[in-house]
Amino acid sequence: MTDPTPLPKPLLTIRPKRSWLPPGPRELWEFRELLVRLAARDITLRYRQTVLGAVWVILVPLLGAGVLSFVFGGVADLEAPAGIPYFVFTLAGMVTWTTFSQVTTRTSSSLLGNAQLVSKVYFPRVMLPLSTMLSTLVDVAVSLGLLVVLLVATGVHPGLGVLTLPLWFLLVLALALGVGLAAGALMVRYRDVQYILPVAVQFLLFASPVAYTLASVPEGSRIFFELNPLTGLLEGMRWALIGTPRPSLVLAAWSAGAALAVFAAGIAIFSRMERAFADVI
């Protein structure tokens, strides 16, 4: 008897693409388990070897809101809208700011933080910033839960504007992810970005009405704040969360359009530069 003909070995050919477009939904869906595992790993590693562990998820927004309340409400003597404690007003702004800043900084460093993985294994590289964003949303959910508890305790009601909360939240995520994707792709080739980005984010904190309202900004300087896409999103999130006056339609439209444009630009830059990640990183 002769041996049976051996079956051909499976062959998968991976061709680097040169496109401004991201991977299709079908390819991303095939790697969904990797997305979940990477996100779970990020959450585990984030609080490993800390004394307080996951308690920091609650302490960080409380401490941040406390410091900003002291500086702007105590020292600068600014006032929150009527009927809203200044701490609650600041915490609502901090939830929005934390979502933007954490998603931006963490997604931008996700490629360099997984350099060994990027250079040795094939998978859609966009999975790394997406998984980082997913793990960051856990912290944001805790901050939102904390704010809800404070709203109930202080008797602050958000009003019908709360129905628009998902829209504002998605726009904040789009803006943050767009900046993070572009910065992360550029950071692989130009390491200067990892030093510039934290400074830019810190500057943006003071150039955005996180702990004060846009109405409290001097009229002569208000136009510069309104050009900041975060301003409309902060005003919109506060309107939805604690019932402050809603942003004007012009400001809301400008912020929404800018957030979507930055998101599209971030995806395009990331997809275009993805081809060289494994060689350069």
Image (cartoon, rainbow, N blue to C red):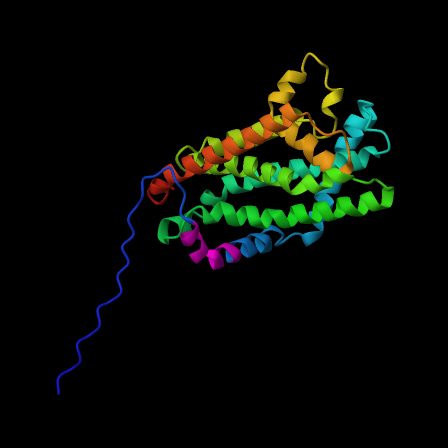
Q: Quadrant of the N terminus?
A: bottom left
Q: Residue 11, percent across and down? A: 26, 61
Decide: is 205 above or below 131: above
Task: Give the residue at x 73% y 15%.
Answer: 218
Decide: is 80 above or below 107: above
The answer to which quarter of the image holds residue 90 is: top right
In magenta, the rendered stretch is 25-36
Decide: is 119 above or below 181: below
Q: Per the image, is 147 magenta?
A: no
Task: Give the residue at x 48% y 38%.
Answer: 181
Q: Residue 179, percent across and down? A: 51, 34
Q: Residue 228, percent across and down? A: 60, 24
Q: Nearer the viewer, residue 11 or 202?
A: 11
Q: Nearer the viewer, residue 175 or 190?
A: 175
How many marks are shown on the rendered structure? 0
Q: What is the magenta segment's predominant secondary structure?
A: helix
Q: Is residue 208 left or right of residue 17?
A: right
Residue 18 visible in the displayed image:
yes
Residue at the far bottom in the pictured view: 1
Q: Residue 169, percent across and down? A: 63, 40
Q: Per the image, is 27 magenta?
A: yes
Q: Nearer the viewer, residue 76 or 229?
A: 229
Residue 51 visible in the displayed image:
no
The answer to which quarter of the image holds residue 255 is: top right
Q: Quadrant of the C terminus?
A: top left
Residue at the far top in the pictured view: 220
Task: Give the residue at x 47% y 48%.
Answer: 128
